[in-house]
Amino acid sequence: MTDNFNPTEWITTQEAAELTGYEPAHIRYLAKRASIKGRKFGRAWMINRESVKEYADRMKQLGPARHDPWRTGARERPTDS
C-alpha cells in the first residue's frame, strides 16, 4: 500500500455495485480498464468510492448517448455520399 491510501475512501466491488446499480463483475471490468480507480489486493478489488460515483453520474448524464461510439469525437461519423 502507498502512504496516501485511506481505507475509508475505498469500498468493495459489492458495495460499489449496490451504490451504482451495476453488477460486481462490471465494476471489476471498469477497474481493470481504468475507467474507475481500483486496486487489487490479493483476489479482492477495492474501488475508490468517489471515482465510481463520478462514473455513474457521468453515465446517467449521457443517457442513451453513452452507447454512441462517436460521442467522444475519437471517430468520424460516416457521411452518405
Image: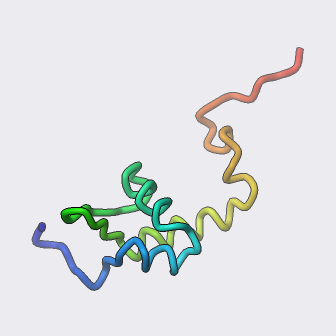
> Residue visible at 67% across and 44% down?
71
Task: State whether residue 52 is above or below residue 25.
Answer: below
The image's colouring method is: rainbow
Which residue ends up furthest to the front in the rendered image? 43
Residue at the spot x=70%, y=44% of the render? 68
Compare residues 19 and 71 and report the one nearer the observer: 19
Q: Which residue is drawn at the image coordinates 40% and 76% (left, top)?
A: 49
- Check the picture and name the quadrant holding the N terminus: bottom left
Residue 39: x and y, percent? 27, 63
> Whole-percent x and y of residue 3?
10, 72
- Residue 71 vs residue 27: left or right? right
The correct choice, above or below, for 31 with respect to 9 in the image is above
- The quadrant in which residue 29 appears is bottom left
Extreme top residue here? Answer: 81
Residue nearest the viewer, comparing 67 with 58: 67
Q: Position of residue 20 (x, y in %)?
A: 55, 75
Q: Position of residue 64 (x, y in %)?
A: 75, 56
Q: Residue at x 52, y 65 (%)?
A: 55
Q: Quadrant of residue 58?
A: bottom right
Picture layout, residue 74 above or below residue 18: above
